[in-house]
């Protein structure tokens, strides 16, 4: 039998160890719970309070080492190693930090810096930008203007008061309410895909305006190339020049774009949703324009409020009860802290306001293939930012500490059990 002094000593050890465990848990639980809360329910803001850039890349991007802009070159090169080792069909990666090109690669010989890449649905983000420019110039009164008011010459089938009330904002948010079957339907003629039927019609705008209404505008989200066609057509109607000519004069030339090409659809209208061809360096400039709240070299190209609205989620819930990760022809990934333009086969412009970062990808990813670009951004580009891994380190240390506490707790319980048995 142990002595009274020994029992008191053992009890003191148990008490001190227990208090240590409780204190450690309290110190670790709070930051870990905050980390997990932010990871599960991230708050995303596109407010960018960055200073005026050192220069404007109108005449081309200036180059800098990654280290000079707070990035780790080894981490970025590790991304290139993965692209090559896994043989990902990525054609270009361009990373812009603080306005400087810090990483630019073209893994496949054919796709060079001068290659005009078909952007597919990244074109939609350029189209919405043209609407913002037209608003800035006073050609359009605002996003609450009704769509049909821009097409008085058209005799429209399936008249409906809901169609009369459809606005530019409804087109920007893909909530026009028109009957439209595109997402999830093969892009093949005869498949029932509304975009393909539109392309085969004599006049794309007529086809879209003739569609019956299936929902009240602003209440139901449906991915629609038709909405983008109408936006591009509205620009043409108010500017008295083609959509491509307007883009050239008021967006491409001010930002210093090189060559470009924008295809047309039936009726002679601009293929606003998917027909634009540009270089990787030039599409990154659109991201830089948005990163700087619509200003370029002292000129407000499009309203800052337009940028803010375009890059935040619309207030409509999806099937899971969460807000849609879609703005005004821009997508949002709150978990990555980005908004982005997204085109078929892996064309992307990613903007991370918190890090003063723009990333452009072009690729040839098959429709049924794995798209690695978000994973590359998360696993290499973000971690390359010096200091960006603080939360991850904290989380890892927390896990290790909790594991250590668990071991200590087992030892304490074991000793306490032995004390009782003695």
Image: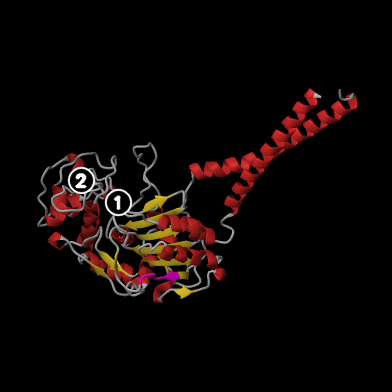
**Gap between marks 2 and 1 measured at Cα:** 15 Å
Q: Quadrant of residue 129?
A: bottom left
Quadrant holding the N terminus: top right
Given residues 199 and 99, the one toward you in this image is 199
Q: Which residue matches tag 2?
A: 180
Residue 288 shows in this picture: no
Q: Give the residue drawn at x 29%, y 39%.
A: 219
Q: Give the residue drawn at x 14%, y 52%.
A: 197
Is 211 inside the magenta-drawn segment? no
Mark 2 or mark 1, whichever is nearer to me: 2
Which residue range is magenta in the image?
A: 104-108
Q: Is residue 416 above or below residue 360?
A: above
**Residue 351 picture location, percent across and down:** 43, 59
Number of residues whose C-alpha sits closer than 10 Å to that of mark 2, classed few (under 14), some (14–19) or many (20 or more): many
Which label belongs to residue 54?
Answer: none
Q: Main secondary structure of the magenta part?
A: loop
Residue 379 shows in this picture: yes
Is 106 inside the magenta-drawn segment? yes
**Residue 39 picture location, percent across and down:** 51, 45
Q: Earlier in the sequence, mark 2 or mark 1?
A: 1
Q: Which residue matches tag 1?
A: 172
Q: Secondary structure at mark 1?
A: helix
Given residues 299 and 331, the one toward you in this image is 331
Farthest residue toward the bottom?
59
Q: Secondary structure at mark 2?
A: loop
**Residue 297 picture location, percent across and down:** 43, 70
**Residue 200 picture location, percent across and down:** 12, 56
Q: Is residue 166 left or right of residue 12?
A: left
């Amino acid at each position: 039998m142990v002595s009274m002094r020994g029992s008191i000593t053992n009890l003191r050890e148990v008490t001190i160890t227990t208090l240590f465990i409780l204190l450690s848990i309290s110190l670790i639980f709070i930051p870990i719970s905050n980390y997990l809360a932010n990871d599960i329910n991230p708050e995303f803001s596109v407010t960018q309070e960055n200073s005026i850039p050192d220069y404007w890349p109108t005449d081309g991007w200036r180059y800098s080492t990654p280290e000079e802009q707070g990035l780790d070159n080894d981490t970025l090169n590790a991304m290139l190693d993965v692209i090559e080792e896994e043989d990902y069909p990525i054609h270009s990666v361009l990373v812009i930090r603080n306005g400087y090109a810090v990483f630019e690669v073209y893994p496949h010989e054919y796709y060079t810096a001068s290659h005009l890449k078909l952007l597919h649905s990244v074109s939609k983000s350029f189209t919405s930008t043209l609407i913002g420019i037209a608003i800035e110039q006073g050609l359009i009164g605002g996003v609450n203007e009704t769509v049909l008011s821009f097409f008085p010459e058209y005799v429209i089938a399936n008249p409906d008061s809901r169609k009369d009330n459809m606005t530019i904002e409804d087109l920007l948010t893909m909530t026009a309410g028109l009957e439209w079957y595109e997402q999830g339907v093969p892009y093949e003629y005869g498949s029932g895909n509304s975009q393909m039927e539109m392309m085969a019609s004599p006049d794309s705008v007529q086809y879209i305006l003739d569609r019956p209404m299936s929902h009240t505008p602003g209440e139901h989200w449906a991915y629609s190339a038709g909405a983008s066609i109408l936006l591009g057509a509205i620009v043409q109607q108010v500017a008295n020049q083609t959509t491509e000519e307007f883009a050239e004069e008021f967006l491409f030339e001010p930002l210093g774009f090189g060559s470009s090409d924008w295809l047309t659809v039936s009726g002679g209208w601009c293929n606003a949703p998917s027909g634009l061809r540009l270089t990787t360096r030039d599409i990154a400039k659109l991201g830089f324009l948005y990163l700087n709240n619509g200003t370029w070299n002292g000129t407000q190209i499009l309203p800052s409020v337009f940028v803010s609205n375009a890059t935040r989620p619309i207030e409509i819930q999806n099937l899971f009860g969460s807000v849609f990760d879609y703005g005004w022809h821009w997508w949002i990934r709150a978990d990555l802290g980005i908004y982005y333009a997204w085109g078929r086969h892996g064309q992307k412009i990613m903007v991370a306001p918190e890090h003063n970062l723009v990333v452009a990808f072009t690729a040839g990813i098959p429709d049924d293939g794995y798209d690695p670009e978000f994973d590359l951004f998360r696993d290499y580009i973000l971690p390359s930012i010096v200091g960006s891994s603080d939360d991850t380190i904290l989380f890892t240390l927390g896990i290790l500490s909790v594991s250590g506490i668990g071991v200590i707790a087992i030892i304490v319980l074991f000793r306490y059990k032995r004390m009782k048995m003695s």
